[in-house]
Amino acid sequence: MDAYSGDYSEVTPALREYAAQFAGAIAEVRAEHSGKDYDIVREALAVRLRSVGIAPVPQVLDDLSRQIHAGER
């Protein structure tokens, strides 16, 4: 994302796109890997996020992987 000028309307479309890509990646991994081994889920999630241009944050990756592994929503 470019430098922020202070006008939220300028960044809103980029934030929507980012959120949609993030949610889509999570949904795909959840659909394919729910209940599978934690390490497999974590790797699949990291790969999927990177494939849409999102750098996984370790703590977020850990928490989401735990939830998907446990079959939680």
Image (cartoon, rainbow, N blue to C red):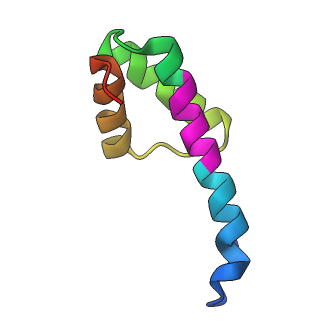
Q: Is residue 1 visible from the viewing direction of this image?
A: no
Q: Is residue 68 above or below residue 20?
A: above
Residue most extreme to the bottom? 6
Q: Is residue 2 above or below residue 71?
A: below
Measured as percent of width and height from the top left, residue 26 is found at 51, 32
State the residue at coordinates (66%, 88%): 7
State the residue at coordinates (28%, 27%): 66
**Residue nearest the observer in this picture, 19 or 48:** 19
**Residue nearest the observer in this picture, 62 or 30:** 30
Measured as percent of width and height from the top left, residue 36 is found at 36, 9
Q: How many marks?
A: 0
Residue 22 in the magenta stretch? The answer is yes
Q: Is residue 65 above or below residue 69?
A: below
Region rendered in magenta: 20-28
Q: Is residue 51 visible from the viewing direction of this image?
A: yes
The quadrant of the rendering that contains the N terminus is: bottom right
What's the magenta bit mostly, secondary-structure-wise?
helix
Measured as percent of width and height from the top left, residue 3 is found at 66, 80
- Examine the image and state in which quarter residue 53 appears: top right
State the residue at coordinates (32%, 10%): 37
32 left or right, relative to 37: right
Residue most extreme to the front? 73
The quadrant of the rendering that contains the C terminus is: top left
State the residue at coordinates (66%, 33%): 51
